Amino acid sequence: MLFDRIEDRLDNAAQRKVAAFIAERADEIFEFTCDLIRTPSVNPPGDEVAVSRVIMDRLAKLGIEDCSIAACLPDRPNVLARVAGTSPGRTLLLSGHIDTKPAGNMYEWKTDPWDPVVIDDELIGLGSGDMKASIAAMIYAAAALRELGEFPGELSLALTADEENGSQYGSKWLAAEGYIAADVCVIGEPAGVHEEWESIHLVSRGAALFKVVVIGTQMHSSISDQLPAVNATLKMAELALKMQGELRDYLTFDDHEYCRFGPTVNVGVTAQAGVTYGVFPGRAEFGVDIRTIPGMTEEQVQADVQRFLDDATASDSELDATLEWFLMVGATEIDGNDPIVQSLADASQQVLDRTPRLDAFPGATDAAYIQIAAGVPCIASFGPGFLPRAHSPNESMHKDGAAEAAMIYALSALDYLTKEHGTTA
């Protein structure tokens, strides 16, 4: 049985009551995860109405009455919920996004992306680990504390839209409109890079996104060997290769304990060139994605990239390249001594019989807005699933991940909220 020995690792009656609530509903949590997968919320184009209704219905079924929809557009709803204790105290926010990436190459899927299937203990389905299992787990963790009744403080949920396409209608809007308020937040992105439940991620790396436009000579292609001409496509290719090999050396950053590999440079994440046959290409462009680490600012990254381009054009009289900046989402970091870190570590030991290490999440998360804009320190990622399988055909996670996450969230929330008051009985 999944949780048959967990009582041996629990310290008090409140923990045992919370754990019993989750253990008795492990199959229900799994089925709810499957219901969420069956409800498409693909972004782009972006429409979370159907999945938000499934979530609101389940919250009502579990007796969580303090819940609402907050949306700046009718088809981009965010679900907010709150379970208040019986005395004042801290507020813990659990947050996850309810949209998914598109399924992508359908011919590579072994199953229907929206028909969850278990094969060899793996739950396969679009959004399984990224992050509908976390959504299910957070809802049931809140229900467990509601059932417990007596505890200090408050457990809140912010289940957000639009995370997979920039968070404009999700956490960014919620933070700007004052909907986000808590002492600390746990975001349920997949915690595993090499294995599930690998790390508690204290850092969310940022993302600097921009294009480089290369100008050449647009002309009739039949005379390109008779007149001076610059092929923008070939110049773009040369510059892209040079940038991939050299740009990282131009970037200004300090070594970071949890970002052992520093920033990641991805050149050519998009590319466009030329017009059609018969036209010598006079314009080409490619997109670049830099995953930044704490301490790297937008102004400095932009200046570093421009310095690289200035040197490249100075060394090649035929190169005409211009930087078109899109945006930078900042990196975040929470203090490793924050009480939520120990609460998550202790709950993981109780549930998984091991303690995940502390590390950095490779990607960007909603922490960029919850922490930077709203001022709520964030655990950038701690949830079920396996990051390399996210955004991929046949996305999958262990079938027990949602129930494990619900147990970890419920026990860590109880510990975090009660520890300050010494109420552990």
Image: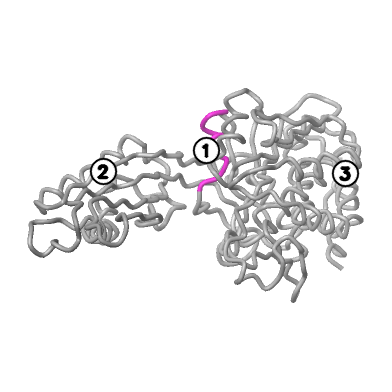
What residue would you read off at disc 3? Answer: 14
Q: Is residue 139 above or below residue 4?
A: above
Q: Three-letter amino acid code at disc 3? A: Ala
Task: Read off the magenta span.
Answer: 364-374
Q: Is 184 contained in the magenta span? A: no
Main SS, magenta residues: loop
Q: Say left or right for 168 vs 407.
A: left
**In the depicted view, which residue is nearer to us: 365 or 355?**
365
- Earlier along the polypeptide chain: callout 2 or callout 1? 2
Q: Is 365 contained in the magenta span? A: yes
Q: Name the outermost residue toward the bottom.
A: 120
Residue 382 at x, y percent in the picture: 64, 51
Q: Three-letter amino acid code at disc 1? A: Ala
What residue would you read off at disc 1? Answer: 368
Of tags 1 and 3, the one toward the viewer is 1
Of tags 2 and 3, the one toward the viewer is 2
- Earlier along the polypeptide chain: callout 1 or callout 3? 3
What residue would you read off at disc 2? Answer: 304
- Earlier along the polypeptide chain: callout 2 or callout 3? 3
**In the depicted view, which residue is nearer to us: 103 or 167?**
103
